[in-house]
Image (cartoon, rainbow, N blue to C red):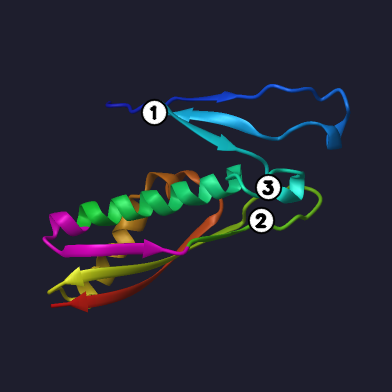
Amino acid sequence: MKQHSYETQLRWSGSTGSGYRGYDRNHELVVAGTTLRASADPAFLGDPALPNPEQLLLAAASSCQMLSFLALAALAKVDVVGYADDARAVMPETGVLTQITEIELNVTVTVKNADEQEVLRLMEPAHEQCYIANTLKAAVTVRTTVTVIA
């Protein structure tokens, strides 16, 4: 069986000696040689100017859906010339178990000389083949708008 493996590095330094409110949430992630500064959600005392783990999870789901869709579209010889996603995640604070419960991908696909229904039909298997969506416990919904250009 073929297996894919992935690696990242995370680096943080500081002190938690001042208590929960006193330590810096900012840290660095290294992915494929690129350093990305990140923090916690501002609700958890993070820096609002930096991406947080919840946003990065949402971005991973969005990116994976797009890449799965583009692969299927290319195999079906559908000419996709644009793809945008205004993604959204919901994480209710229940007090017991806080988790992202819902991910909504609001996709707009622009295709050239293609059938809108075929594009919509490709989105479902793309979702089923999305590795990230298959890994998540949260429901992932994909809403698609198609624009056909000549």
Query: SS at mark 2?
Result: loop
User: What residue did someone put label 1 on?
Assistant: 32
Q: Which of marks 3 and 2 is in front?
A: 3
In the rendered image, residue 136 lying in the magenta stretch gets the answer no
At label 3, which amino acid type do we have? Asp
Q: Quadrant of residue 125?
A: bottom left
Label 1 CA crowd tier, 10 Å (few <14, some 14–19, many 20+): few
48 up-or-down from 21: above or below: below
Q: Where is residue 61? Give x, y as percent.
A: 45, 50
Choose the circle earlier in sequence order: 1 or 2.
Answer: 1
Q: Residue 41 carries which label?
A: 3
At label 1, which amino acid type do we have? Ala
Looking at the figure, which quarter contains the N terminus? top left
Query: SS at mark 1?
Result: loop
Label 3 CA crowd tier, 10 Å (few <14, some 14–19, many 20+): some
Residue at screen point 53% across, 30% down: 29
Drawn side of residue 82 relative to residue 48, left or right: left
Front one among 59 and 33: 33
86 up-or-down from 21: above or below: below
Question: Is mark 3 in CB contact (under 8 Å) with mark 2?
Answer: no
Query: SS at mark 3?
Result: loop
23 up-or-down from 100: above or below: above
